[in-house]
Amino acid sequence: MASSRNILRRQKTHTKRTYPEKKAVQLPTKQEEPNMYPAQTKGKSRGEQNNDLMEKVLSRQNMLKALRRVEKNKGAPGIDNLTVENIKPYLCQNWLSIREQLLKGDYKPQPVLRVEIPKPNGEKRLLGIPTVIDRLIQQALLQILTNIFDPDFSPFSFGFRPNRKTHNAIRKAKQYI
């Protein structure tokens, strides 16, 4: 009896299926076709688009917001020993050169300072501490890129997103149980 079932299963899987004919999909012929890359601006070269994006990242308003966030987070100095408290005087002297390097694509982040943190079980956890300037630039980039890409993320994605926490994910999971 079991063998006849296997034969029937094999027959079912090997039967030829017929599918409806595929129809060609016609894309809209309007001049304003949707752009797959929301960060890009229509009619501009990639270099111009990158500069537009970097101009947004390096705008005074965005950089001040990023600076406030870095100052609020505090944190240890990186490999260059520049502290959060000393970042404003440093930026007053060096910002134009840093900004120019970023716009040209010549900026090179500093190496990350490696620190070992002891764990309760006796092992050590490696931690990388970027410089305060690199944290400032990362924060400025994050603020602009989040506005561009976050709306396309799944509403069920909770990791590392604004106004979403592990607690929200747990609460949502409990609703399904």
Image (tube, helix red, strand yellow):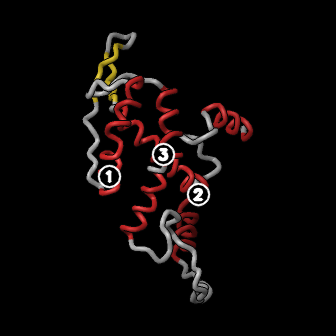
Residue situated in front as seen by the camera: 152 or 121: 152
Q: Is residue 22 visible?
A: no
- Look at mark 3 in the image and give the residue it sits on: 142
Please tell me whether mark 1 sits on a helix, a strand or a loop: helix
Q: Residue at x 38, y 69 (%)?
A: 46
Mark 1 Cα shell of 10 Å, populated few (<14), some (14-19), many (≥20): few
Which marked residue is nearer to the observer: mark 3 or mark 2?
3
Q: Amino acid at mark 1?
A: Glu
Q: Residue at x 53, y 62 (%)?
A: 3
- Look at mark 2 in the image and give the residue it sits on: 152
Instruction: Residue 100 in the image: state x and y as whole percent.
Output: 32, 52
- Look at mark 1 in the image and give the residue it sits on: 100
Describe residue 35's horizontal placement relative to residue 82 as left or right.
Answer: right
Q: Is residue 163 visible?
A: yes
Instruction: Residue 153 in the image: state x and y as whole percent.
Output: 58, 53
Q: Which of pointers 3 and 1 lies earlier in the amino acid sequence?
A: 1
Q: Residue at x 60, y 84 (%)?
A: 19
